[in-house]
Amino acid sequence: MIERAQACCEYCASLARYSMSPFAIDHILPLSRGGQTELENLALVCQGCNGAKYNKITALDPISNREVPLFHPRQQRWRDHFAWNAPCTHIVGLTPTGRATIVALQLNRFELLNLREVLYTVGDHPPEIYMNKQSSNR
């Protein structure tokens, strides 16, 4: 799983090597909602995203105010739903699912913004697999 995710959180794109806490394995469709423990339902995630997601599968899109599905790392491509702002510190939602996931999982948490800024200045952010559409990505 670590290799498949290239050692990044599959939601916020944080690199595991810079995390203060070990990454977790998320059941994308939670067990409590009928999900199974199989590779197509598992994602590598940081503790922040794992805690914020808990057993959520939907959230409100802040623009339309409609309940939409959260991003599904096995069924959707990150770059189709998210992009980076110009200094690559904030994740921007491109779709209702992207916007809802950013809010629900707090993908722009204060500590992530600081870390992204520092890593960007030394050329270690964003991870290549999470570059905007012009680059190769999931």
Image (cartoon, rainbow, N blue to C red):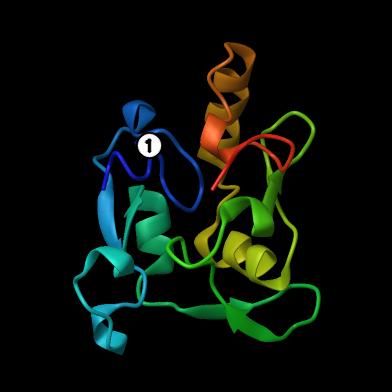
Q: In which image quadrant can residue 110 be found?
A: top right
**Left or right placement of residue 26 versus residue 125 in this view:** left
Q: Secondary structure at mark 1?
A: loop
Q: Nearer the viewer, residue 131 or 124?
A: 131
Residue at image position (31%, 33%) is 20
Between 132 and 22, the one nearer to me in the picture: 132
Residue 120: % across, % down: 62, 21
Disc 1 crowd, CA 10 A, few/some/many (<14, 14-19, 20+): some
Q: Answer with the quarter of the image where residue 62 lies.
A: bottom right
Between 38 and 120, the one lying in front of the other is 38
Residue 23, compared with residue 88, is above or below; it is below
23, above or below 94, in the image: above
Residue behind mark 1: 6
Q: Is residue 88 above or below residue 56?
A: above
Q: Is residue 72 above or below residue 125?
A: below
Residue at the far left in the pictured view: 37
Residue at the outermost front position: 136
Residue occupying the point 62% across, 25% down: 117
Q: Amino acid at mark 1?
A: Gln
